[in-house]
Amino acid sequence: MFKHIYFNSLKIYIREKVIVFWLLVFPMILAVFFKMGFSGLTDGEAFEIIPVAIVENNENTELMNVYKGIFNSMSDIFDVRYVNKEEAEKLLEEEDILSYIYISDGRLAMTIKENGLNQSIVKEVLDRINEGVELVMSGYVSYEEIGTVMNVQNVLNNVKISNQEQDYVAAWFYTILGMAAMYGSTLGVMIIENTQANQSAKAMRFNIAPVSKMKGFVAMFGAGATLHSVIMIIIYLYLRYVMNINFGDRQIYIILTSVVGGITGISVGALISVLVKAGENLRIGICMAVSMLGSYLAGMMDNSVKYKVMQSMPVIEYINPAGILTDSYLKLFYYEDMRYYWSNVINLLVIMAVCMAVTIFVLRRQRYDSV
């Protein structure tokens, strides 16, 4: 019975022209418009010294001297100026620097004007430095040893893959895959519509059939996951080999990320569908709105939004599947250290698990006396 439900559900999903359009055709069309809009801008750019400013802090001279020593040892990465707050803001506004750095609650923080790879490098280095300072504060190393802990070559190696050139435009196309993954939420709505007896006549017939409700749900979900995984791979191959978008050399990991992201999108749609008591069109509308909002926050319409979110509402970065997926492709492309990538994959799996757990909990609690 499981196999029967699985294959029949797969046939039903494939025949749904609206679902196939939004999951497969629309992302491809959007990629064409992106390609036209960014025509001639996709050539890689060589790595250059990053101009930054550090705001002087006279209240903690010992810590400030440690930071100065670290940044002075990074002259092959950063062109550093030491200024006051007003000068730093002026330099940033005039675009003489990409970021200015300051001490906040004993940690380094940064302010940027727009998004970019170099800004990502600055953030990554600051995270590493803050980790080293925390070791100092915990008593594991001394101030004198922090320079060794923050070895500049290790930082640079972990931030940027040496044989990859910067490609600022590619990140826009990565958001298309993030959006396509979240569009899988419409499949989640369809799965619940065929499972909950109060949502459709099909679901009523399913609930009186001699088959476990959970087994049927898993079969339908598996069929949706199979279809969407294939669609995600097709879109990725289309972007890479037809649109000639540079995703780097880690193709197996890119495909894995796309599949996980697509299944996460379905689970988000299933969760929305069991929680929202409304008609199918409204639930699909909510899923599309959530997908577009997530894509916007991931930087699809304005690439500076992603960093504004990171600065003002960092929690969103951990719960937005489209943003996590986009970030995963960037980390696969630029970072040698796979820990940063795997942390994103784990994040997606956690979101998927939470959505599925709540969905199954709600489905198991529902009973229909009249069915």
Image (spheres, helix red, strand yellow):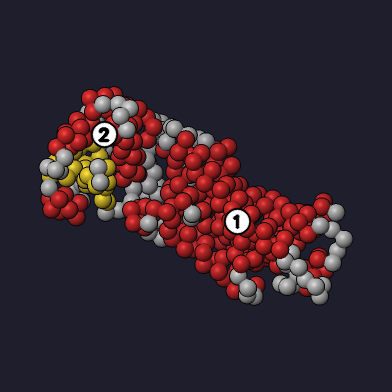
Count of marks, rendered view: 2
- Residue at image coords 82%, 51%: 3
Which residue is tagged 2?
A: 77
**Quarter of the image holding residue 160?**
top left
Tell me how far mark 1 sits from mark 2, CA to CA. Answer: 42 Å
- Residue at image coords 68%, 57%: 360
The furthest residue to the right: 210
Q: Is residue 354 left or right of residue 215?
A: left
Q: Amino acid at mark 2?
A: Ile
**Quarter of the image holding residue 302?**
bottom left
The numbered mark at residue 1 is: none
In the figure, 39 relative to 150: above or below?
Answer: below
The furthest residue to the front: 139
- Element under disc 2: loop
Q: Is residue 214 left or right of residue 174?
A: right
The numbered mark at residue 355 is: 1
- Residue at image coords 61%, 50%: 353
Image quadrant holding the N terminus, namely bottom right
Counting from the top left corner in percent of width and height, residue 220 is at 74, 57
